[in-house]
Amino acid sequence: MSQKTNIIYDSHTYCIPNLNGNGGFEDISEFRKHLQLAGGIMGHSLPAWRKSDRKTDDNYKMVYPKPNWSFESLKNVELNLKGHGRFEWKEKGEDYIKQILPPTISGMEYSAENLIAEMDYAGVNNVLLHRTPYLGIGNEFVSSCVKQFPDRISALAHIPEWLISTNQDKCISNLHKAITEMNLSGLQFLPLFMNLYDKAEDWDSEKYIPFWNFVSDLKIPVFFTLGPRSKNTIRNYFEELKVFARWTQKYPEVTTVLTHGFNWRMFRDGNNINLPKKIFEILPIQNPNFYIQLVLSVTLGGKWEYPMNQFRPCLDNIINQTGINNLLWGSDHPFETLHYTYRQCINQIGNYRDILGEDGVANILGLNMKTLMNSTID
């Protein structure tokens, strides 16, 4: 690791409430639907296996073949979340398992104490907790994590995206409380989940203006997780990036982060990632308030082993397009340990030192994130 790296700030981590609870939903069955859909379609590309002989099976085992991002694609199975990060269920008399959390997590939760222990061992100074509905929508849990370790852990608030257009006053009130009373440091926004609730409109449309104006007034960063919202095609992905670009034109003063970076898997071709030039033409790469995360081990670790030398040409392309000062390192911890260790995720950036330079490694591993947080949070 570079001796000039005086801070390591992980821009993308999780603490996880007990997944056998309600996840902040009023109806636990709704939370279970999110768990099944995410485990079936996402699941970090890991296959299910048959419990009797450990034979691997279809990655989409909890949903119907050729799944779409819809609750209607769920099979009628009952999840059993016993522990060790596994989703278990029975289908046609057979027991199946899919590893969603790392097997070292004995229960179905990941506490702030667990995270701090891993941070200490890997040499990570600070982290930012991210959010997603299949890991709970309540802000209380992440707020409690921040309060336990306020000098090490920060966290993003989450407001259910599907409620904003129809229950805006309550959403604004909840966000205000999350930031001003619960010590949260920004907003996580995941428009993909709007489609699950038949909210297919663009999220920069007129009906969202009061909410976004309030976000702008709060002077908090917004972390956008973007992907194709209907069909999983490059065209649909570009359409979502265009909505984001329009949004940043309306709110250029708001600090924005494109979580995970780009849809790496969509552009992977064998041992290469070929990012279309159009991506950089769409995105606001000239805006100093725009940042891109490099979250690689979770998205590509299942395909490429450490230290992921295959990513080098793609990284060189990104640097040539955007520079270094707007790039953030993120691990997706603890999910990255399904493929890499936490230390390897850090050392992976150092492995690109010949492309980044010593200062570039230091900036990406922590200094850029520290600058972002210091510029948006009093």
Image (cartoon, helix red, strand yellow):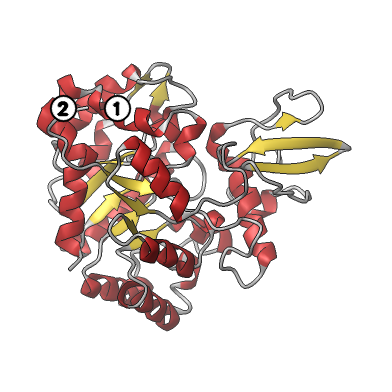
Q: Is residue 326 visible?
A: no
Image coordinates of residue 72 in percent, x first then y, are 68, 53
Query: Left or right of 103: which side holds 167?
Result: left
Query: Left or right of 238: which side holds 216?
Result: left
Q: Residue furthest right?
A: 93
Nearer the camera: disc 2 or disc 1: 1
Q: Which residue is mark 2?
A: 356
Where is the C terminus found, in terms of image quarters? bottom left
Q: Residue at x 27, y 58 (%)?
A: 151
Q: Is residue 339 visible?
A: yes
Spatial CA span between label 2 and label 1: 13 Å
Q: Residue at x 37, y 78 (%)?
A: 177
CB contact under 8 Å: marks 2 and 1: no
Q: Quadrant of residue 103?
A: top right
* Of 266 and 371, the residue lying toward us: 371
Q: Which residue is mark 1?
A: 347
